[in-house]
Every structure is written in C-alpha cells, then in structure tokens.
C-alpha cells in the first residue's frame, strides 16, 4: 500500500539534486528507494538518510566517465 508523503520545498530540492547526479536510467529506481523509506511528514534528517540509503542501493556504472584533463603549465 502506498503511503502519502508531505515534503517541504527544501526536502524536494534535496531529492531532486541527488537524483540529478545519477544517470537518467538509474533515477526511477533511486526515487522508488527514497520513497520506500519515507512516510507522513519526514524531517530533513530522515530525508537525508533515505537519500543516502537509496544511493547505496542504486547500481551506477561509471565506466564511461571521462578522466579529468591535466593542467598544462
């Protein structure tokens, strides 16, 4: 059964910011994992904990990540 969750603008921004850092293909699973840990009116600490737990459970492969360029002096 789905539980309603009431988020403040700041809390929603935290979740959006964390999701934006992920590849598009991983965002839906991440958001579902966050929602699984929330109910009612969660505190900012509960939001942060849910984000961290979801990030730990969201498989992300960075094999296509670019290496930082070296500075030329």
Image (spheres, grey):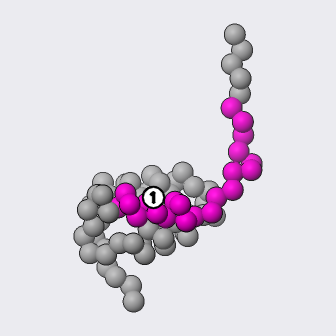
Is residue 43 left or right of 32 when viewed as pictured? Answer: left
* Residue drawn at x 71%, y 23% as measured from the top left: 70
| Residue bearing the label numbered 1 | 52
2 and 9: which is toward the camera: 2
Is residue 19 left or right of 37 when viewed as pictured? Answer: right
Element carrying mark 1: helix
Can residue 56 be spotted in the picture?
Answer: yes
Quarter of the image for residue 65 reads top right
Up-down relation of residue 56 to residue 69 (above or below): below
The single residue placed furthest to the bottom in the displayed view is 1
The single residue placed furthest to the right in the displayed view is 64
Is residue 44 left or right of 27 when viewed as pictured? Answer: left
Q: In which quarter of the image is the N terminus?
A: bottom left
6 drawn magenta: no
23 and 56: which is toward the camera: 56
Q: Report the number of numbered marks.
A: 1
Residue 45: percent from the left, percent from the top? 30, 58
Residue 73: percent from the left, percent from the top? 69, 10
Up-down relation of residue 61 to residue 42 (above or below): above
| Magenta residue span | 47-68
Residue 19: percent from the left, percent from the top? 50, 57
* Residue drawn at x 71%, y 27% as measured from the top left: 69
* Residue drawn at x 39%, y 72% as measured from the top left: 37
Can residue 9 be spotted in the picture?
Answer: no
Up-down relation of residue 24 to residue 38 (above or below): above
* Residue drawn at x 47%, y 54% as measured from the top left: 18
Residue 25: percent from the left, percent from the top? 63, 64
């Amino acid at each position: 059964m789905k539980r309603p969750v009431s988020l403040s603008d700041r809390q929603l921004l935290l979740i959006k910011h964390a999701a934006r850092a992920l590849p598009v293909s991983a965002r839906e699973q991440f958001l579902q994992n966050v929602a699984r840990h929330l109910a009612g009116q969660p505190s900012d600490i509960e939001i942060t904990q849910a984000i961290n737990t979801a990030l730990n459970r969201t498989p992300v492969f960075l094999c296509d990540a670019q290496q930082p360029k070296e500075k030329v002096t």
